Amino acid sequence: MEATFRQNRTQTTQSDAAMTKIDRSTYSSLSGKLSKGTPSQYFVQRFIDKTTVTVYPCPDSTAASKDMHIFFVKRIQDVDSTYTDATDIPYRFVPCMVSGLAFYLAQKYAPDRIQPMKLYYEDELARALAEDGSSSSTIITPKTYYPGV
């Protein structure tokens, strides 16, 4: 959700610098990904079983007294004691999967509930897809074209 880079964590004059979240295309367009400095941007890549955070630029050699503070939402772990039964989808799609299953079951077993189940399914799908989107800004400027000039 948010991240800050804290400097001088062991001293009384610590300071936090807000970091900007960037999307995949912005990160891939950075030319010097290994350049050193104070991190000001971060890129989050979400997988089924893990999430990685990449900072830019890379912290310099004096990073011993520096921390990155990440504010995030964590889901509840499985109730199974062995922790081996995980779904094969990201957790943010679980409500969508459940409401989609209810919609498809309603088509066969409860035709009078098809429309409400379809609305739930579409709403949950839109919510899950919106969470995958980037929160970085996009500015589109049209190019002015004058034919015959």
Image: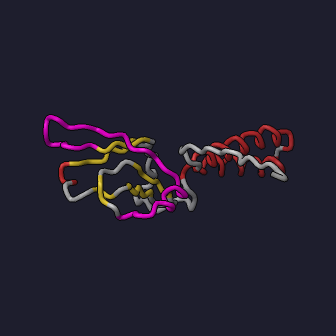
> Taking 114 as reference, is 81 above or below it?
below
Question: Residue at image x 65%, y 51%?
Answer: 97
Residue 130 lies, in percent from the top left, at 62, 45
Where is residue 21 shown, x and y percent of the image? 46, 47
Q: Quadrant of the N terminus?
A: top left
Where residue 122 sits: x, y (%)? 73, 44
Span colored in magenta: 6-34
Q: Residue furthest left?
A: 11
Q: Is residue 112 left or right of residue 49?
A: right
Relative side of 18 to 149, left or right = left
In the rendered image, the residue lying farthest to the front is 149
Where is residue 117 shown, x and y percent of the image? 76, 41
| Residue at the image position 55 percent from the left and 55 percent from the top | 90
Front residue of 37/66: it is 37
Q: Does residue 147 belong to the magenta stretch?
A: no
The number of numbered discs placed on residues in the rendered structure image is 0
- The magenta stretch spans residue 26: yes
Of 102 and 60, which appears nearest the observer? 60
The residue depicted at 70 percent of the width and 40 percent of the height is 123
